[in-house]
Image (cartoon, rainbow, N blue to C red):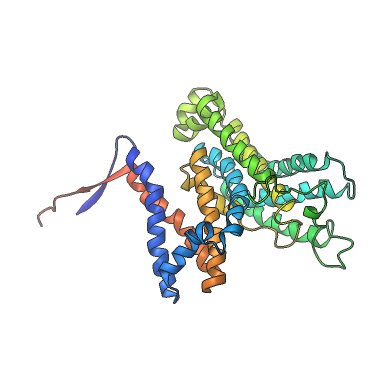
Amino acid sequence: MIRLEKRRQPSTFWSAMAPLLAVLLTMIVGGAMFAALGVDPVAAIRTIFWDPLFNPQFASYSRPQLLVKAGPLILIAIGLSLGFRAGVWNIGAEGQYIMGAICGAGAGLIFYPSESVLIFPMMVIAGGLGGWAWAMIPALFKTRFGTNEILVSLMLVYVAESILASVSSGLLRNPEGMGFPGSRNLAQWDASANRELISGTGMHWGVVAAFIAVILAYVLLSRHILGFQVRLSGAAPKAARLAGVSPARIVIFCLGTAGALAGAAGLFEVAGPAGQISIDFNSGYGFTAIIVAFLGRLHPVGILFAGLLMALTYIGGELAQLMLGVPGASIQLFQGMLLFFLLGVDVFTHYRLRPTAREPA
């Protein structure tokens, strides 16, 4: 017989190895899934992880796309990780991402066709505030009425999607779009466009903001008293309260920060790669960022690399669908396996396997 025995201290070895082992297990089980679908598993794994970076036929297009896809994932995941460290479970970043895009795009379109240099910075601020305001709903419900932030933030995603569909067909619809839903193309309006900063790299202001967020989050968690309070609230809530840490303040800070970063990510996306507010604007970045946060061990530097890895699966998955005919749903399942196996392997960070002697009948 084998039983799980709790470790006195979390294992540093397993903490470091868990993400790597989760990726390896995802490749193995994912390969078996592709084989069951009638696709060569080796070709599928190679197409997802190797071809976007090193295949000369695709690399010139895929490499810049790596930063384009990773930017919003990293930016959202950094905000989520602060809350997860404090035990504040914000599952509604997708809604905050959508509302940030709507508010930011709306703030800019008010001034169309002005070419003022102030329009894009104003849109970024409006996008961040839109995401922050949407995150304040579950924050206030939790601090005032003790509701569960998981349920409230998640349900608000569907409300945000309904608002997105409404404004795409109504308030923000392009008056010159011949009645079709969708706003003006912000990427084609110089004052609002989030253009590539270095040609051929995919680097735009959203990617810059993501790198800045990584640095600031690292400094906050390792050098600032607020970061210590965040970590203490998650590790030992009772000790945090005895130390004078306000639980309500931590909840508002964590949810507000996550909402602002998700909202800014939505604005950078709608003013750049997506280009316009449309019914199908939301791409699931808010949910995928949860995987990125945990795959990066809730550490800013880890999230940076996890975001790049997840972006690689997005790009490689699109290539696999195009070149091998892999179903899109299987790529989403493949991405979900990363979190599944990470949570499974992570058990060994806190527990060890112990054989037990069989008791005589």
Q: Position of residue 61 (x, y in %)?
A: 61, 59
Q: Return the residue nearer the eye: 51 or 241.
A: 51
Q: Position of residue 88 (x, y in %)?
A: 54, 40
- As drawn, is 19 to the left or to the right of 122? left
**Residue at the farthest bottom position:** 38
**Residue at 45% of width from left, 59% of height from top?**
337
> Across the whole image, how many numbered discs are drawn on residues?
0
- Please say if 77 is above or below 26: above
Q: Position of residue 179 (x, y in %)?
A: 86, 67
Q: Quadrant location of the N terminus?
A: bottom left
Q: Answer whether residue 327 is visible to the viewer in this image.
A: no
Q: Position of residue 62 (x, y in %)?
A: 58, 58
Q: Quadrant location of the C terminus?
A: bottom left
Q: Return the residue nearer the eye: 216 or 150.
A: 216
- As drawn, is 330 to the left or to the right of 15? right
**Residue at the farthest front position:** 56
**Residue at 45% of width from left, 74% of height from top?**
39
- As drawn, is 194 to the left or to the right of 41? right
**Residue at the farthest left position:** 360
**Residue at 65% of width from left, 46% of height from top?**
203
Q: Answer whether residue 183 is visible to the viewer in this image.
A: yes
